[in-house]
Image (spheres, rainbow, N blue to C red):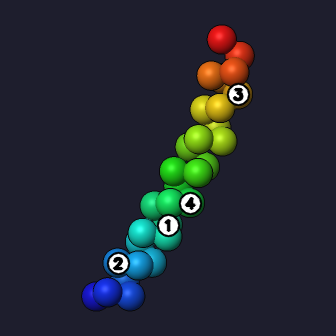
Amino acid sequence: MIKFMQKSERKKRRWVLFLIVQTLPMILDT
């Protein structure tokens, strides 16, 4: 269970980073 949670946390962090990278150009554009 703990290992699974740690894996999901890592995935979440990666997803957040991906989202930031995707939205950054739009934010800088305005």
Local SS, label 2: helix
Q: Which residue is denoted by mark 3 in the rendering? A: 25
Q: Amino acid at mark 3?
A: Pro
Q: Amino acid at mark 1?
A: Lys
Q: Which residue is denoted by mark 1 in the rendering? A: 11
Distance of label 3 from label 4 (alpha carbons):
18 Å
Q: Which residue is denoted by mark 2 in the rendering? A: 5
Local SS, label 4: helix
Q: Which residue is denoted by mark 4 in the rendering? A: 14
N-terminal of the pair, mark 3 or mark 1, is 1
Task: Give the quarter of the figure containing the N terminus.
Answer: bottom left
N-terminal of the pair, mark 4 or mark 2, is 2
3, above or below 18, in the image: below
Distance of label 2 from label 3 (alpha carbons):
31 Å
Q: Residues within 10 Å of mark 3 (few under 14, many from 20)?
A: few
The residue that appears at 59% across and 41% down in the rendered structure is 20
Q: Amino acid at mark 4?
A: Arg
The residue that appears at 60% across and 32% down in the rendered structure is 23
